[in-house]
Image (tube, rainbow, N blue to C red):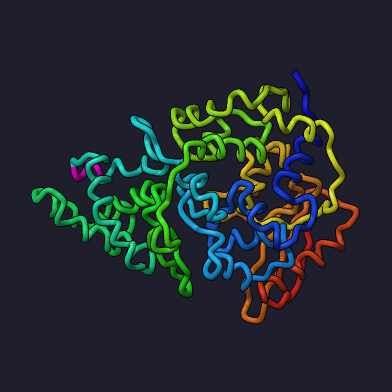
Amino acid sequence: MIELSLEQIRNFRLYTHHLDRIFAKTDIDKLVGACGMQNTPPGAWETALYNRVPGCSLSEMDDLLYTEKSLLQAWSLRGIPVVFPISQSHIFLSALIAEEEEPWIYTSGISLALDFLQMDFNDLFRILQQVIPQLDDCAIMSKTSLDQTLADRMLPLIPENKRVLWSQPSMYGSPDKQTVGGAVVSFLLRPCAWKGLVVFGERQGTSPMFTSYKNWTGRSLIPEKDACKELVRKYLHCYGPANVNHFVSWLGCSGKQGRRMWNTVSEEMEPVSALGKKAYILSSDRERLLQPDSTERELLLLGGHDPFLDQRDREVLQPDKTLHKQIWKLVTNPGVVLYRGEIIGIWNAKKEKNGMDFTITLWKSIPDRPYLYALAEAYAAFRQIRLLGVEIMI
């Protein structure tokens, strides 16, 4: 069995995540489609694309999403908003559809509402699918309004003896804004997304718009039989060497669904030893893994939710596990200082009235530390915010 070194793995992942050099705007579909780009918190995908195509402006990114519509935003892996090429909708949406007896991604929390209503998941999902096609002819602003509008439209179809319960305040933390029905809809919107029944439209200020895939693109979402294979290939290419548990965690799915999908490409993968453990790579990636290439970019300021940071074997990114809690938070992560594929520090940008202050914390010294100032200045320019100052702490 091949033994892979830490340096080989880091070099390979920099290459597959397109962080080894600067790319052109003509490559954007390839870059965004590598494994999708998370867009929570809002703007995360813009920072990720900027780190691969610094020459692409914010307005050009908006055009790709809202005017050209070559890219699409929808709830995808782990149930989070993800931006991906619209041509790959079957991979980032249809592939996630659960099969019989597989729980749907993201929906485990719905059980509290189901117990309160004493209703079945599948029955409620069928009712929602009866009313949500109304999005084919309209768009709804804000997630809160989307939840409640659809819950109200479901109400006449809910058994009469359950309607009072359906309209009770939510038990999920926002009883003043959400009903129990609205909470149910919130969970079920993810499965609806994977069927092409709801996507993100153009953002209006701080509020996203929601409509159907058909209304946004002009055509229905058509599942393709090899979508699962294509998704697993993407994962293994970007995050290999990996195992099925890594894949399940990245996708946020059940073990049953993850294993089914993983096994669709079993004949295309082979075992290797990585960090002393058995893992798998695509056989087609073996040669590149064993022959690392030089990178044109060694030092980067990555956004805190860059897809490169979704590696499940986090010790590859930072061997010192005591530092992991500083990198991966429960809500919003800081940005990271990446040097040759290793996280050597974190950064935060604080918006002030007149501009942006940058704070960088390093855990080890680097030869080109002054370059960090240039990177911070370039990022502020991309965000169209004046850089007030950069503080580097070691």
Q: Where is the C terminus found, in terms of image quarters?
A: bottom right
In the depicted structure, whether residue 41 falls above or below residue 240: below
Label total for image:
0
Q: Looking at the image, can residue 51 be seen?
A: no
Q: In the displayed image of the protein, which residue is found farthest to the top?
A: 1
138 vs 140, nearest the viewer = 138
Q: Is residue 142 left or right of residue 125?
A: right
322 vs 16, nearest the viewer = 16
Residue at 72% over, 61% down? 53
Residue 29 magenta-drawn? no
Residue 115 magenta-drawn? yes
Q: In the displayed image of the protein, which residue is found farthest to the right?
A: 367
In the depicted structure, whether residue 193 falls above or below residue 349: above
192 vs 149, nearest the viewer = 192
216 vs 74, nearest the viewer = 216
Q: Is residue 327 left or right of residue 79?
A: right
- Residue 360: image location, x then y, percent: 74, 60
In the depicted structure, whether residue 113 falls above or below residue 348: above
Q: Looking at the image, can residue 106 be seen?
A: yes
Q: In the displayed image of the protein, which residue is found farthest to the left?
A: 161
- Magenta segment: 113-117
Q: Magenta span: helix, strand or loop, mainly?
A: helix
Q: Is residue 198 left or right of residue 86?
A: left
Q: Quadrant of residue 294?
A: top right
Residue at 61% over, 36% down? 233
- Residue 386: image location, x then y, percent: 71, 78
Residue at 76% over, 69% down? 378
- Residue 389: image location, x then y, percent: 75, 73
Q: Where is the N terminus found, in terms of image quarters?
A: top right
- Residue 192: image location, x then y, percent: 36, 50
Residue at 64% over, 47% down? 34
